[in-house]
Image (cartoon, helix red, strand yellow):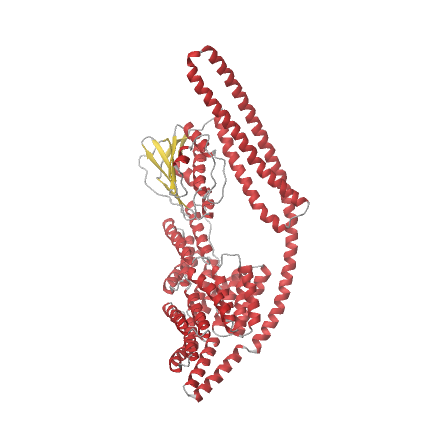
Amino acid sequence: MLLIAPFSGTCSINSSADTAQINSLNKLAAAKYNLNPDSTLFYAKQSIALSKRSNYQDGLANGLLQTGKAYYFKGKSAEATQAFDRAIAIFTKLHDQRGLSECYIHYGRMYTLLAKYDNALHYLNMALAINKKTGNEKELTDSYKNIGIVYFSQGQLSKALDYYYNGLFIAVKNNYTVLTAELYNNIGVILQTMEVYPNALDYYKKAVKIFEGTNNLHALGTLNENIGEVMLAQENYDQAIVYLNHANAIAKKQHDKDGLSSVYTDLGLCYAHKRQFEKAIRYMDTSIWIAVKYKIVYNQGYAMSGYATVYNMQKQYAKAYPYALKAESLALRLGNLSVRADAALELNKTLAGLGRIDEAYHYLNQYIDLKNSLKNNESIQKLTSYNYELSFSVKQRLAAQRQYEKDLLYQQNIRMSRLTGLVFLILIIAMIVIACIYYVEKKKQQRINRLLKIKNMVVSDQRTDLDAQAHKLNELNILKDRLISILAHDLRAPLSTLRGLFDLLQDESISHAELLEMIPPVIKKLDYTSDFLDTLLFWINSQMENFNRAVKDFSIRELINKESENLFEQAAQKDIRLIVDVEAGITGCADPDSVRIVIRNLITNAIKFCKEDDTIEISAQIKGDDILVCVKDTGMGMTTAQLKKLFKGKMDSRIGTHKESGTGMGLLFCKDLIEKCNGTIWANSKHGIGSEFAFTIPGGQQPATAPYTVNTVEV
């Protein structure tokens, strides 16, 4: 049976770009821990390397903490110890109490796994003292839970219950759902040990209900194994194997050595009871090999007792005897009453089979005494008392939650009313601006048409040139009509969505929870419309004759870094690596706002057509008198036919890898803006391999000696 004790990360915030990237890497490492510890190790090592280069001590300490967690989860206790010690030294210098508490908790968990209970309690009690002093109730709950695990491992069930319920009352009061589920599981383990199986299953199912639908695979694997063990104890072997195989699959995916070893023993016992002894022995062999290699003492004792059970069932008492003795020795070292009871029972069966009746009788009495200790009245009385208090606490929390939701709904209605007025105001202003632009462009077109007629009458020998101008004018007219069509569609869609949402609110046909689910996509549509309007209005303004282009020298690296930072979270949502590789000191001479819009569009397009684990690289370098900027990705790429349509008025918008939509106008705007900066833009692409977009602009005044530095931002 397994106990759950996961981690919640901590990061400091700093204003520099490198510091923000380090903090993001540490957050990613913490988020991946319950899903894939190998990813935690990968992101934490990236954070450590960048922290060392930037001399960012807080980021370095948090990176070391994440690597320590991943190492001990993978059974590498020596590497974990080294990482924790270095993190503790840095957190102590920084006076970071929360960071120290995290280190102490995970140190304690590691020593619990190694059956070094005095060391575990030493570190966990230090964490408990810090959290009591700082008033951090979430970390305080975690400390209570982990200390309870140590006392359970020592067989002190009554003490374990005290700590579990101390933590559970805080978790219920503050609605810490994950911690509540973990404590439900741990209390279920105590009930399972006391052989109160129906109540144990109730607690396990409460925990499963909370964890289902989350990314916490470790917790779901643990709960599947615990339910499987209850089924095994109730002799429902086929159902037990189903749950244990689920747990086994998760443990393999996460490289969870503790979980794998324990599950293999359980599966071995299931197959032994089904009289499939060869298969049972194979599972036992694998379990003991993992437990010995990674020094997991509890699992060694559990597997040794399992070996004895399998051989006793076959009446091979001579083979069972040494395993039963080893199980007893390890159980005494652990101090775990449950493992000692199992070992005593198997020794009783073995010695009786060997004809050593007096010794068998001694172990039978020992088994009965140990079982009685596990089922002592004190623990049962505490369970009854604590459950009564817990029921009262839950009722109080639910009443408070209902009042909070009522207040929240009232505030939400007020905010939505204000938001509605603001959105309508923005849309009205946008429509007025578009109408004005349309009027100005119409007058401009009429003036051009009049001039064209005059030139046709005066200069007949220039008809070829005039035909070309008429063709170009016709293309501009088509482009104008298409812009108006896109604007009408893109403004109507969010407006219609808001109208429908407000109708639902007015007739109260949706609940508060349903409203909260519908708001994010509406805001996403509004963000997209606002961003497109900004780009469009800037482009339209650039077409005006009196548009003032602020041509000046500016830092290419600063401009690219700023746009990359703004799009970092968007790339992180798709697990895309965003890399900036720019020589320091490169200066361009153009309108920086035009160049900024082009870079933002190219990066946004790259993110749109990239998949998870793809890479986007943005680079810039000096090429003669010009500056060459490239945006290269490993995404979907384009066919030759699609490539030929780029930068032309007939280009159609494609759907992104996550169903992102677009207008198909972005590259037309980019081409026009770059050409107005006296530059050129082009693209290369291969379908299924990736794309590269590049453009040049005139170079500015470069420094006499520009040291080469690379700023790498990777997601």
Q: Is residue 78 above or below residue 682?
A: below
Image location of residue 233, percent across then percent down: 51, 73
Q: Residue furthest right?
A: 507
Query: Is any atom of residue 88 visible in this view?
Result: no
Image location of residue 175, percent across then percent down: 58, 59
| Horizontal side, residue 346 vs residue 584: left or right | right
Image location of residue 581, percent across then percent down: 36, 42
Residue at position x 55%, y 41% in the image: 525
Residue 421 sits in which quadrant?
top right
Closer to the camera in the image, 133 or 180: 180
Callout count? 0
Query: Is any atom of residue 413 visible in this view?
Result: yes
Q: Is residue 314 above or below residue 410?
A: below
Q: Is residue 40 above or below residue 457?
A: below
Closer to the camera in the image, 221 or 540: 221
Q: Residue furthest top?
A: 458
Closer to the camera in the image, 509 or 573: 509
Residue 360 sits in which quadrant?
bottom left
| Horizontal side, residue 643 vs residue 155: left or right | left
Q: Residue furthest bottom?
A: 358
Closer to the camera in the image, 433 or 447: 447
Image location of residue 610, percent across then percent down: 43, 44
Q: Is residue 399 above or below residue 481?
A: below
